[in-house]
Image (cartoon, helix red, strand yellow):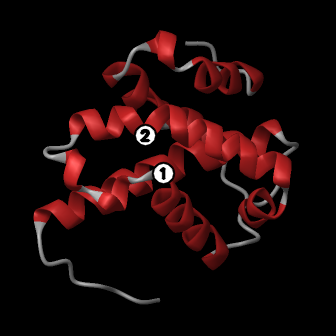
Amino acid sequence: MSCKVLSSSRQLDIKAAKKLLWASCLWLICHVNGGIAVGQVHDSDRCSSQLRSLVEELLPIIRAQTDDSSSMPELELDNVLSDLESYSRNIPTAIPSKTLAVNELRFRNGWFLDHGDKAAQRFHLQLLQETGVHC
């Protein structure tokens, strides 16, 4: 296990935003595709396309809540997707717990529903419904 000391609260905010995206997106993609492992999401064109679409939908909500997000290249789509994959590759056989995700829904996916326009989260809502979560 490695540890990195961040030099600013801005860096911490960016890391927290990416962790929120990972925790909110990967469980959904894994479970709508039969309970696959996180590494398999990135190995599958279909699943990685679903992940990209979901992150594209949710990332603007994070940017809107982040001060001066226009000057944060770390929150550009390709950078975020690369970091999500890197995190997943560290635990490639992990299958996120649907039970835990549902129990923490308010702090994961619910955060996006509370802070963004639900009408702009069609894919997010569709995936939640496909996993049996109705919002």
- Identified by mark 1, the residue type is Leu
Q: Who is closer to the viewer here, 37 or 11?
A: 11
Relative to 64, say whether 44 is above or below. Answer: below
Q: Say if residue 83 shows up in the picture.
A: yes
Mark identifier at residue 41: none
Residue that appears at 76% across and 56% down: 41
Measure the C-alpha gap from mark 1 to mark 2: 8 Å
Helix, strand or loop for disc 1: helix
Foreground: disc 1 or disc 2: 1
Question: Residue 29: x, y in percent?
Answer: 72, 43
The quadrant the C terminus occupies is top right
Quarter of the rendering containing residue 37: bottom right
Mark 1, residue position: 77
Residue type indicated by callout 2: Leu
SS assignment at label 2: helix
Mark 1 vs mark 2: which is more N-terminal? 2
Q: Residue at x 41, y 53 (%)?
A: 76
Looking at the image, is 79 positioned above or below residue 120?
below
Crowd rating for badge 2 (residues with CA inside 10 Å; few <14, some 14–19, many 20+): some
65 w.r.t. 45: above or below: above
Left or right: residue 21 versus residue 44 is left
> Residue 72 at what x, y percent from top left?
26, 56
Are the two marked residues, 1 and 2, in contact with CB atoms closer than 8 angstroms? yes
Residue that carries the numbered disc 2 in the rendered image: 59
Rendering coords of residue 88 (x, y %) = 62, 68
Q: Residue furthest right?
A: 34
Viewer-side residue, 38 vs 99: 38
The residue that appears at 40% across and 14% down in the rendered structure is 117
